[in-house]
Image (cartoon, helix red, strand yellow):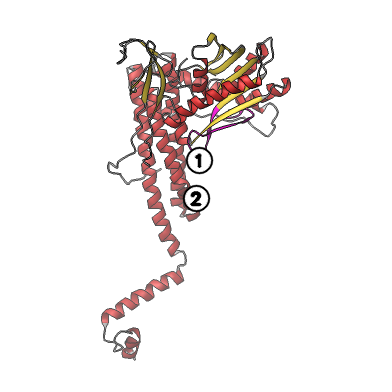
Amino acid sequence: MPVQFLALLNPATGTGENILSFILSLIWIAFLMVFFLYPSFGQRMQLGYMLRDLEKKLQKLKSIKDEIQNITVDAVKREGSPEKDPSKDIERLSEFFLIHPESMDPYGLVYKLEHILETGESVYEAEVARLVPNATEARVKTLTNLFEILRGINTLYRVVRHYYLLGKKTSNIYLVLQIQMVLPQLIEIAESYRHAAVAFSKGQPIGDGVGVLVVAKLADGLEKNRYEIVKDTVIQELEFENRKVFVVRAAGPAGTVGRPGEAVKRLVESLAQQPKLIVTIDAALKLEGEETGKIAEGVGVAIGGPGVDKYKIEELAKSRSIPLHAFVIFQSITEAITPMKESIAKAADVVLEKVKKVILEKAEAGDVVVVAGVGNTVGVGF
Amino acid sequence: MSEPTIVFGSRSREKTPQPIVFLKCLSCNTENSRPFIEGDYVMKVVNSEKCPKCGGTQSKIVNIYVPEKKESK
């Protein structure tokens, strides 16, 4: 009987004398039994592979975070010459947060959000200034941007680590799968943060500053008067082909976006003559496959961010029936926060000509036009 | 909370792009370029650099960007 059984297990010889074949068959049966009796065994194996992959990528995120932290520490030491090691304070600031207002009752939400954002900005800037008491105001603003990058990468790392550890703890393949699917994009964002940290630590212009670059070129040589209208935001008065042009932009070359919404609102309310047109210029996110530096023209307010500035200009334009014209320059999220690329800088010259053409076409001699250049003004002066 | 344990070797990272500064001489309008130096910004008037063409000492930074590689046809 055993001989017959062995023979059955040995299709090669049919004699039942191959002991190796018998052992292999037993292993094979045992393996099949594991899959039959323990159906989630395959899933467990897959989870193991996924967790290992996630662990490698998480380690990469950590190394990028550490590199940005080192850049920040170096920048603080260089600018502020602190007596004690600033690493502890930098770590504390990287955990800084803002709590968005409650939206169950949406009444006055925009102004509540504005208040929180402005308070947060002031508090954060003051904390950074305390770390670098010898730095100029412009450097403090640029360093604040650097701290915000550190805050961003820190949050990204903590969230990914949370899902990794939760997935590992609960052996939940679906949880791990979700974070594994989005991780390549998150790594790309982290790499952009790394390049952005270098750009901000050195004060180099970034892709997001293209709107400000356009208006800086528009005002170059034509400026008659300049004044700060709201925090970090200036008005430049120009005379262009007998039209009075008011340029609104963040004060450079420090790294700030200013408050273009409030600035346009206060400017228009203070003018004796109603503007014929409000033009906004900003960087916009391109879709995959689209060319960097592509220009598009339309109607509306071209301002990204939390929406406070956009809301203010829209409300003002509606109440006074002022036409809104917008230009956007397309770029990826990476290009927006890393040193400005040639195609984006070249697009600024094209947009400049288009803005001039719009002013000439839509406003007559003696008319007033408001042109707002939106974006981070790091590395772009007057 | 346990930290991930795998330690990476020194894997080559994408280098941070280095921008080029374009200066316009205020005497002869010639455009010159050089690598970015900390403190440079667009519209900055530079008084310390001589124009290679006319020897003028005042120039203005008109552009700062990372040049892109031209595709070969």
Q: Nearer the viewer, residue A123 or A276?
A: A276
The answer, for residue A65, to whether it is visible in the render is yes
Provide the residue span drawn in magenta: A282-308
Q: Which mark is residue A178?
A: 2
> What residue is at 43 percent from the left and 64 percent from the top?
A42
Residues beneath discs 1 and 2 located on the same chain: yes
Amino acid carrying mark 2 in the image:
Gln
Is A258 left, or right, of A89 in this rendering? right
Label number found at residue A236? none
Nearer to us in this view, A166 or A46: A46
**Chain of the residue on which disc 2 is drawn:** A
Q: Which residue is mark 1?
A: A290
Which residue is farthest top?
A: A225
Task: Tell me what residue is drawn at x 50 percent, y 54 percent.
Answer: A174
Q: Can you say which quadrant of the picture contains the C terminus of chain B?
A: top left
For the residues labelled 1 and 2, the Cα–Cα distance comes to: 27 Å
Report x, y in % for residue B57. Answer: 33, 10
